[in-house]
Image: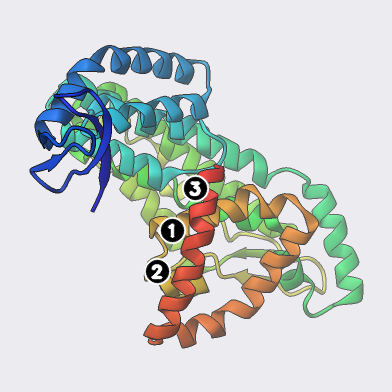
Amino acid sequence: MSLIDIKCPNCGASIQLDNSRESGFCSYCGSKVQIQEAINKIKIDRSGDIEKYLSIGFAATEMGNGQEAYDYANKILEIDSQNADAWELKMSGIGCMPGYNCYQMVAAGNKALELTTSSEIRNKVYIALLSISPFYLQNAYNELLQDLQIQKDLYESYRKLYPSTAAERMLKEDFILMSTYENMVQIPTLRFAVPDEEIEKNEEFAEITVEIAKGWITCGLALNERYKTYNMYFSDEGLEYWKDILEKIKRGLPDKYLTQEISSDNLNLNQLPPKPNTPRRRVNNSPPKNEGCYIATAVYGSYEAPEVIILRQFRDNTLKKSYLGRWFIKMYYYLSPPIAEKLKNAKFINKFIRSLLNKWIKHLRKKH
């Protein structure tokens, strides 16, 4: 049951009725109310508000104010949940907000595509999904290359204290590497949300796709540079994954765009010369698996469940910014895998844990 706010057409009172039913009764005057008819009347009466909210929202995206655009999109969707322009605005707002919200962008964009027959809106959705990817990749590239000298010095100190486990310790404590890599592997979902045939027939889309491919290559090289500070390098599986994603990004590109500049030959990521008397180590950098590896994923059944995405965003945008938060994340990664394994088939316990997590997720939604 979902209650909606409407006005009684007889007495004008504000009432709440169940929108899953055809009709209801006004609690003030007792008259019968046809619910869909009342909803349609609200849409007509507030069409001016919708136009105003759209205008303000899109102006906010041009100024880079994603939160304001997102809020105005939600105001429109409260009036008309089937408004394709509002879903497009919501998608654009998410793209301008801090952090990597690739899955949410794709979900909002797909909703806009589902609700529209307008080629103009479809092109706007596709161009937004594509054009944000090079920006995200550039941001990931910058993050991976920051503080490398500090990390090298710290690694050398660890080698003196923990000769056999220094690299593993550094990887576990390098939160920039952990968070950037996890965010980075989301980014291709934006490109994959655009059909290959659209890339093939639209030159603007093709040109942006080339930039995405270049960004994917440079991010791979930057990731390898960070591994090299710990005398590590890409595993064969990780390298194959990186090349496979690159080939998928390029799908649909006309032949004239398939230059050497975006060839997988540029991903020579495991050519790290060993340091004297120090064995090289392979790092397992294959993509995160969408399995029940951690507690939230085990409880909700999918790494991409909306609830799990919200919890990851809380981790990235809040916990990682404080020492205690980073300590909590470290302990969670250490303790959660065996617990999650036991939760896979524990339906009753899963239900209980889900109810607790749902309350926390509800709080996070209200707060953010």
12 to 240, vertically: above or below: above
Mark 1 / mark 3, whichever is N-terminal? 1
Task: Judge the density around disc 2: few (<14), some (14-19), many (≥20) Cα neighbours within 10 Å.
Answer: some
- Residue 133 position, x and y percent, is 44, 36
Image point 86% across, 69% down: which residue?
A: 158
| Amino acid beneath label 2 | Tyr
Mark 2 vs mark 3: in front: 3
Amino acid beneath label 3: Arg
Residue 16 visible (yes or no):
yes
Q: Secondary structure at mark 3?
A: helix
CA–CA distance in space, label 2 to label 3: 17 Å
Q: Secondary structure at mark 1?
A: helix
Q: What is the C-alpha distance between the residues marked 2 and 1?
A: 8 Å
The answer to whether the residues at label 2 and label 1 have Cβ atoms under 8 Å apart is: yes
Q: Which residue is mark 1?
A: 307
Specify whether 9 is left or right of 287: left
Q: Which residue is mark 2?
A: 300
Q: How many marks?
A: 3
Mark 1: which amino acid?
Glu
Residue under label 3, please give it.
Answer: 365
Say above or below: 25 vs 20: above
